[in-house]
Image (cartoon, rainbow, N blue to C red):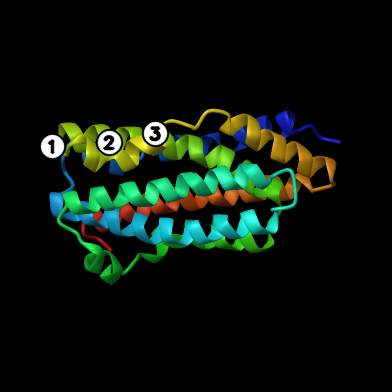
């Protein structure tokens, strides 16, 4: 039987090219050069509002599905993080002059929401191991990008700490997250989860992460 550590390392190597494209994305370069007009930062708020709203439901469903398993605490902790992020996002929105009505009226872009649609699919049909491995790979890239976004919002757009707190929250991985995710993957493999499906979940979620940044970049440039 393949060991969780071995599988996760293999997935990391296979997805390194996608990871590098995410981390070196031109949208981040545009923010650092202040080429994104301030009013178009509203796209960033609106898309995250749609994504977090959906992911809250997805993770809550995962916590219910696996509530009697050893992976329960892992998903409950992720859910707690999503709830905290939801509150912090409202501060970012207010800094850009967006209220609840503006957020509800925002129409999300298909490419930016492909990630959250696949996350909902995993919540319904995926194993705990598939989800944990996908999160483990994805959260690392998302966190590093959030750190760059926060720095740009401070240095190039003059936003204060409260407005940037959403991105600062995601910039560092919670203590114990990686170990907990690996334990969920290990438990799934021990129960017979196909490693091929674990690889697929990580590959697709990371691909949709790249699509999110691509779509946001194009929309911020006014091309979609």
167 relative position to 1: left or right: left
Residue 123 x %, y %: 62, 59
Q: Quadrant of the N terminus?
A: top right
Residue at (67, 34) in percent of width and height: 182
Q: Secondary structure at mark 3?
A: helix
Q: Is residue 129 above or below residue 105?
A: above
Q: Quadrant of residue 105?
A: bottom left
Q: Residues within 10 Å of mark 3 (few under 14, many from 20)?
A: many
Front in this rendered view, residue 102 or 223: 102
113 relative position to 200: left or right: left
Return the residue at label 2. 150
Return the residue at label 1. 158
Q: Is residue 24 visible?
A: no
Between marks 1 and 3, how big is the CA–CA gap? 19 Å
Front in this rendered view, residue 63 or 16: 63
Q: Residues within 10 Å of mark 1 (few under 14, many from 20)?
A: few
Return the residue at label 3. 171
Looking at the image, do the residues carrying marks 1 and 3 touch, with CB atoms under 8 Å apart? no
Residue 73 x %, y %: 64, 43
Q: Is residue 135 above or below residue 47?
A: above
Tag 3 or tag 2, which sits nearer the N-term?
2
Residue at (60, 47) in percent of width and height: 75
Q: Residues within 10 Å of mark 2 (few under 14, many from 20)?
A: many
Looking at the image, do the residues carrying marks 2 and 1 touch, with CB atoms under 8 Å apart? no
């Amino acid at each position: 039987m393949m060991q969780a550590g071995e599988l996760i390392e293999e997935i990391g190597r296979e997805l390194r090219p996608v990871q590098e494209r995410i981390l070196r994305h031109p949208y981040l370069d545009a923010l650092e050069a202040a080429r994104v007009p301030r009013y178009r930062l509203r796209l960033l708020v609106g898309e995250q509002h749609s994504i977090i709203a959906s992911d809250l439901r997805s993770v809550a469903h995962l916590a219910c599905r696996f509530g009697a398993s050893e992976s329960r605490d892992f998903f409950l902790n992720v859910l707690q993080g999503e709830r905290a992020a939801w509150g912090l996002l409202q501060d970012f929105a207010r800094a850009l002059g967006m209220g609840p009505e503006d957020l509800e009226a925002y129409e999300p872009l298909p490419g930016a929401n492909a990630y959250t649609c696949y996350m909902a699919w995993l919540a319904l049909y995926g194993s705990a191991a598939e989800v944990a491995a996908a999160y483990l790979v994805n959260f690392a890239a998302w966190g590093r990008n959030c750190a760059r976004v926060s720095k740009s919002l401070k240095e190039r757009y003059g936003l204060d700490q409260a407005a940037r707190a959403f991105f600062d929250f995601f910039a560092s991985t919670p203590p114990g997250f990686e170990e907990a995710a690996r334990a969920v993957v290990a438990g799934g493999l021990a129960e017979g989860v196909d490693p091929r499906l674990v690889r697929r979940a990580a590959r697709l979620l990371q691909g949709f992460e790249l699509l999110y940044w691509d779509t946001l970049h194009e929309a911020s440039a006014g091309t979609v």
